[in-house]
Amino acid sequence: MSGFISKESIDEVTNKTDIIQVIGEYVPLTQRGADFMGCCPFHNEKTPSFHVSADKKVYHCFGCGAGGTVINFIMEMEKLTFPGAIEFLAKRAGVQLHYTDSGSQTQKEDPDAKLKGEMIDLYNRTAALFHYMLTQTEQGEFALKYITERGLTKETLEKFKIGYSPADRKWLKSFLLKKNYSADFLSKSGLFSRNYPDFAFFSDRLMFPIFDRRGDVVAMGGRFLRGDASKSPKYLNSGDLIQYKKGNTLYAFNFAKNSIRENRKVIFCEGYMDCVAYHQCGVTYAVAPLGTSLTDEQIMLVKPFVDTVLLSFDSDGAGQKATRRAMLMLRKHSITVKIIRLTGGKDPAEIMLKFGADVLTNEINNAILDNDYLLSKLKETYPVETPEGKAKASIEFFEYIDALQSDVQKEACLEQLSQTYGIDLEAARKDFTNREQLSRRINRNAESSQKTQRQQQKVKLSAELRAVLTAVTDDPVHFRKMSCELSVDDFDDIQAKKLFTIMDECEKSGNFSVSSILNRCDADVLKELILQSVTEYSEHIEQSVKDSILLVKRNSLEKKGREILGQMRSLEHSSAPEDRRKLTELLSMKVDIDKQIALLKG
């Protein structure tokens, strides 16, 4: 539209908008007399000083001074211009706007508003197109097979508009040009390569549309499905766009916001699939950061509505680092934090697929407080039975205590540190007071010995990796014995899998030797271990290989047994005939596995 929104339209929007209802969607409000009160969304506060008047249709914060009408509030919360906020509220109230040739200068159009609207329209249409490609075309059949085998239902695919981007990178540009989109407009959309504007940014990927809080598609994320995984990232995500700022957005927040308010909690999880799996299992208060570390802006989206944040990040190094960082950020916002420890699978999607929603819900119910989690992790990291280990663990825990906003909580955590690691409480208090000087001193000592530590560092061998190393010789006979009894799926250890695969490739190529194995290794640590093992296992090698095969077999069977037990637990309280039959089958399988393990041990 051109021109200014008429004064009559503005008055109609204001009169037909319930300010309490609108602001209440962003800020929990409590009625006090004629007014409503809550914690201000524009600054960090613990005691409510944010007043909303239903009669006067205005709000005011006595803490930071923010105030105005419902239009001003929407402008601030949604980052909209004055006309944009009017249009937002008009759509909500069902008001037809009228425009004039004259009006207030405050009504000047956002110069980017038209482009933003057109981009959102493009992304909505593209998401629908990709969804069609996934669910209705032959091209998308393999992707549909992949995602359904991971347990997602047709209803979930429809709800999240999950799609597939065709492998032909020129197809999307050609298609959109035929729909009367200009080449110049498409070049600004983020859907195409900057260097090769005819090539789609996303191709041959499972597509996850990213919605804003109103449910419009504003960006995309694409998961790698096939090809050389080493040459393509697992996920590609839209960068910041005119209609989208990833640091200000949470994936699935549009679906989760009502559930977050009702449950007073939210789950921050690793990525798209984890989040979708939670929702399909009925845990509809899950959201995810978007290819970036958690930001204060993302925390502020949920802070007004939650008492507790549950973190569900991966158990690898990057995931644990993200967990620790998020803990500290959330505690600085005075939010209680719990950690979900996934014991039945590597991620929520795997648990959902293997064991069902009940097991995943049970994992959530067993989430532990972040201070307990951190003390446990530090105990695994440092030798806390030694004075040096106690000091290093304490320094890291002090950073967590420092993030707490309550002196009572700080004191309680110091007492917990003292009890857990056997540290004198007064000594812990003193070190916490002098934590900066203590940290600098420990860091200096660490830096001075770092070179020596690197030289002396030894890689801890897993039993599985040691088992595969027994077969590293110039004679392929020993590996053939192992490969006849085992497959790569019998191993959990990543390095063991890698070495077993390399040796299998060498054996099949007819060039099995220590040198050819070394040539295929891309990790110096693995090469060093191979060189060490050549002499370490030079004697009694036949028995060593035999013992290694038995060890890996037993470990693999024990793992399968644990998985079956997990499935049995998820069904034991069900009275459904199908579940009882399944339980009987699982019990038979478990008995058979126990017999096999007993034979191996005997």
Image (tube, helix red, strand yellow):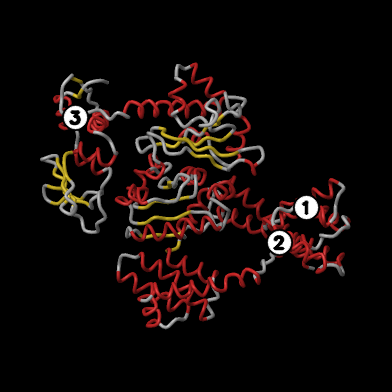
Q: Is residue 550 above or below residue 446?
A: above
Which amino acid, mark 3?
A: Val
Assign the N terminus to one quadrant of the image: top left
Name the element at disc 3.
Answer: helix
Numbered disc in front, either 2 or 3: 3
Check disc 1 and report the residue beneath it: 519
Check disc 2 and report the residue beneath it: 555
Label 1 – label 3 distance at C-alpha: 72 Å
The quarter of the picture where residue 558 lies is bottom right
Which amino acid, mark 2?
A: Asn
x 42%, y 33%: residue: 217
Name the element at disc 1.
Answer: helix
Q: Mark 2 and mark 1 in contact (Cβ < 8 Å)?
A: no
Nearer to me, 280 or 420: 420
Which amino acid, mark 1?
A: Asn
Q: Tag 3 or tag 1, which sits nearer the N-term?
A: 3
Q: Mark 3 and mark 2 in contact (Cβ < 8 Å)?
A: no
Check disc 3 and report the residue beneath it: 13
Q: Tag 3 or tag 2, which sits nearer the N-term?
A: 3
Q: Position of residue 270 (x, y in %)?
A: 49, 49
Label 2 – label 3 distance at C-alpha: 68 Å
Nearer to me, 535 or 478: 535
Q: Tag 2 or tag 1, which sits nearer the N-term?
A: 1
x 49%, y 34%: residue: 155
Left or right of 280? Residue 2 is left
Numbered disc in front, either 1 or 3: 1
Q: Is residue 367 above or below residue 238?
A: below
Label 1 – label 2 distance at C-alpha: 29 Å
Q: Is residue 395 above or below residue 563?
A: below
Q: Position of residue 347 (x, y in %)?
A: 55, 51
Q: Residues within 10 Å of mark 1 (few under 14, many from 20)?
A: few
Q: Is residue 523 above or below residue 184?
A: below
